[in-house]
Amino acid sequence: MATKGNPIMVLAGIERRSKTSSELLSRLNNYGRAFQTLVNSKDAKLIVFVTYVRKSTEVELQHKFEYLEICSVKIKTWRLLRQSRLLLRLIKCQGKGSHLLIAGDPIFGFLISLLVKLQSRVRHSIQVQFHGDIYLRPQSIKAKEYFRWMMARIQFDIADSTRVVSEHQSKKLFEISNGKSKEIVIGCVPIDPIYFSADLTKPRVSIGFIGRLHVERGVEMLREIVACLLSRHSNIQIHIIGDGPEKGSLEQQFRNEAALGKISFLGWLTKEAVIQELETMKILISTAPREGYGLAIREAVLAGVQVVANSSHGANFALRDFPEHVTLYHDSESAIFAIESILETRVSIPATIRARKLQLEKDKHGIETLVRSWS
């Protein structure tokens, strides 16, 4: 795909996301730096069209990220037509030529990009991104899941290119397209550098879970595993990190154990607080039945944590990359067996250092592959 202008990332409702604006834009800044290096021009920047940002955030954005050109719009995300016109105006200010519009989120970012493409006389291109396999037909008939699936399939059909984060996603999308010529780019999500500096020498005292507490993340499996561990080990400490619709029912179910200090519900934590938890965590339980890249799994591995993960595509790729850190299970019984077999082991610092080196190489390759698709 060829574009004459700088790529434009379209992000809607950035401060309503689970990750902070600064954390997300820091990652994009790395992409912008790689893009500038690729085209060998200091004028080349990743333009970020951001909707719904506060004034305090806007000031920070303009000064902190040198490889990004931040264009913030303080209007609500559902005013799509208004936002598309503002984006068109921005594109015209960039000069003549076509641009690659990167849908930074799967709903509003895509719709704004599509409206711009339809309204413009210049043939702009659209790149969509799938970090998870939301393009697979949902097993339930819940309206939200069905709508998300339909939107994903529409995006894939309309987009000029699609960015995914793992090989199995690329293969599945190729099957969905029935072998038609569709540009699919594999660019894994790079790990924040702070995870590579986690202390590997602290005592490991807890078993943890990190993620949104809802059905799609395998919360029922988590219930079974936690209940069994609490009944079989009197001195165990379990730390649940994350919020979600199932958090209240989990807290109610394990109210007595929480009172005894055997289980702690920590809610949403900052990145720095998560790293502190990982530094004293022996085992991370991952219960997601479907996983695109397994970001939390890899972050835990880099902190020296052993991961016991539900056997999904993403977890299988993590096992391939980090066989000394990842163990897979298929049901709660095999999960308990894996956890109990790891409880008495120690952190292998040499193995974790090897994992960090491999991840750095994968991150560098993933960023370079992604930005090459922009030029």
Image (cartoon, grey):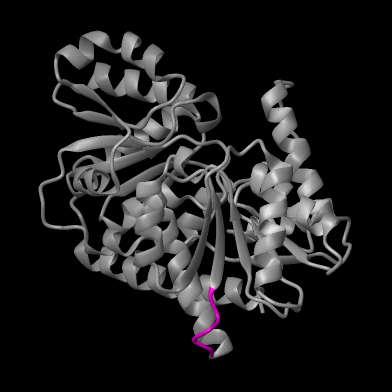
- Farthest bottom residue in view: 40
Q: Is residue 57 above or below residue 205?
A: below
Quadrant of res 185: bottom right
Q: Position of residue 140 (x, y in %)?
A: 71, 23
For this rendering, which residue is in front, 213 or 238? 213
Q: Is residue 341 left or right of residue 237?
A: right
- Residue 287 visible to the viewer: yes
| Residue drawn at point x = 38 percent, y = 28 percent | 243
Q: Is residue 257 left or right of residue 19?
A: left
Q: Is residue 114 left or right of residue 263?
A: right
Numbered disc total: 0
Q: Is residue 291 left or right of residue 79?
A: left
Q: Is residue 297 above or below residue 226?
A: below
Q: Position of residue 110 (x, y in %)?
A: 70, 49
For this rendering, which residue is in front, 47 or 54? 54
| Residue drawn at point x = 67 percent, y = 48 percent | 83
The N terminus - image quarter: bottom right
- Residue 128 visible to the viewer: no
For this rendering, which residue is in front, 331 or 91? 91
| Residue drawn at point x = 18 percent, y = 21 percent | 262
Q: Main secondary structure of the magenta part?
A: loop
The C terminus - image quarter: bottom right
Q: Position of residue 280 (x, y in %)?
A: 17, 44
Q: Is residue 38 above or below residue 254?
A: below
| Residue drawn at point x = 22 percent, y = 14 percent | 257
Give the residues drawn in magenta, as a range. 41-45
Quadrant of res 374: bottom right
For this rendering, which residue is in front, 262 or 161? 161
Residue 234 part of the magenta segment = no
Q: Position of residue 271 (x, y in %)?
A: 29, 48
